[in-house]
Image (spheres, grey):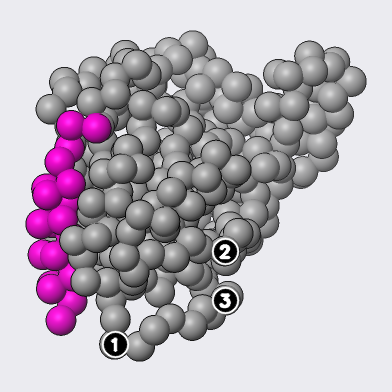
Amino acid sequence: MLLMKKDIKKIAIVRLSALGDIINSAVVLQFIKRYHPTLHVEWITEEMFAPILEDVKYLDTIHTVNLKQFKKEKSLTLLKATYNKLKKLGEYDLIIDMQGLLKSALVAKTLGKHTHGFDKNSTREPLAALFYTTTSTIAYEKSVIERNLHVVGDALGFQVDKTMILHKEPLFTCKHHFRFEKGKKQIAFVIGASWPSKIYPKEKIVEVCNALDAQCHIIWGNEKEKEDALFIEKNSLHVSIAPKLSLSELISFLSQMDLVIGNDTGPTHIAWAQNIPSITLFGPTNERMIYPTPINVALNSPSHVNILKINKQDFSIKEITPQTIITKAKELLNHGI
């Protein structure tokens, strides 16, 4: 290991993107504080994702970079400014790269000399391992939750087992309250995703909503998703379009649901983070992206998924039948009675 555990007072976690990955990474914080209650923990992330971390428990400080802007503009001035910003953050006893990419490894190395991350056989970009002082080994095919907990626990000298994960605290603090109809089950349907092939057809969402005796709220994040939400509302019973929500409001909104149904995307993962029942629909990806529990269920398309070479043109998510979702939704809703 890098240092004696008693000598580690301040650490940095590097997890730059994306929204869902940051949500699934935040679970490590409660276990860090359980085993190292006085440890000062800082997080480096992309500027656009920082708001999701503002409501995370057990995080002391958030720092941001804008590497996406640098990639877009190819500005050496911006790169130099980012480098100088990172160098001014001060000394860390340990920097843990939870992302395992070349860009995150370079950020970690810029922060200090004591770096820890995945070894060359445990990440998509093996060159990243060259920038770590020590490394952890875990199969890339493992659940992202298990991988996150392993690399951090290995660096700090603790282990988290399945029982501990199943009994985790909610990851976020809720700062907002919404009023819903009393006596009626509340379901949120997350209809967007980063790739078109990860999106469940809106026509089939209509079938699901019409078959459930509950108030369904359609979560949207851009104008295209809002158009789809209007289509679902127009053709469904007991459906309303959720208001435009900030990330903080989204956390609180989903935390008040009886069930969240959605594609493999960040907002759907908030349900798992908050211990809210959920159904995640998978086509070109699979349940590696979550940690299934008795109340957090994955429904996979018939497609074979090679997680090392994801096919973004795999639209098999549409082959998940509405009846399959309806049946599982009713089971989860009844579980809470």
Residue numbers of the magenta segment: 318-337
Q: Which of the two discs, 2 and 3, sits closer to the camera?
A: 2
Task: Answer left or right for 156 relative to 335.
Answer: right
Q: Which residue is mark 2?
A: 243
Q: Where is 40 relative to 16, above or below?
A: below
Image-quadrant location for residue 90: top right
Mark closest to the chain's N terminus, 2 or 3: 3
Residue type for callout 2? Pro
> Can residue 168 be seen?
no
Question: Marks 2 and 1, Cα distance to the nearest angstrom?
Answer: 22 Å
- The mark closer to the camera, 3 or 1, is 1
Q: Which residue is mark 3?
A: 176
The crowd level at tag 1 (other Cα within 10 Å; few <14, some 14-19, many 20+) is few
Name which residue lies at 13% across and 73% down. 334
Residue 136 place in picture, x, y as percent: 36, 30
Left or right of 243? Residue 264 is left
Nearest the eye: 323 or 291? 323
Calculate the distance from the C-alpha at mark 3 to the C-alpha at mark 1: 21 Å
Q: Is residue 287 above or below residue 131?
A: below
Residue 202 visible (yes or no): yes
Q: Is residue 142 above or below residue 132?
A: below
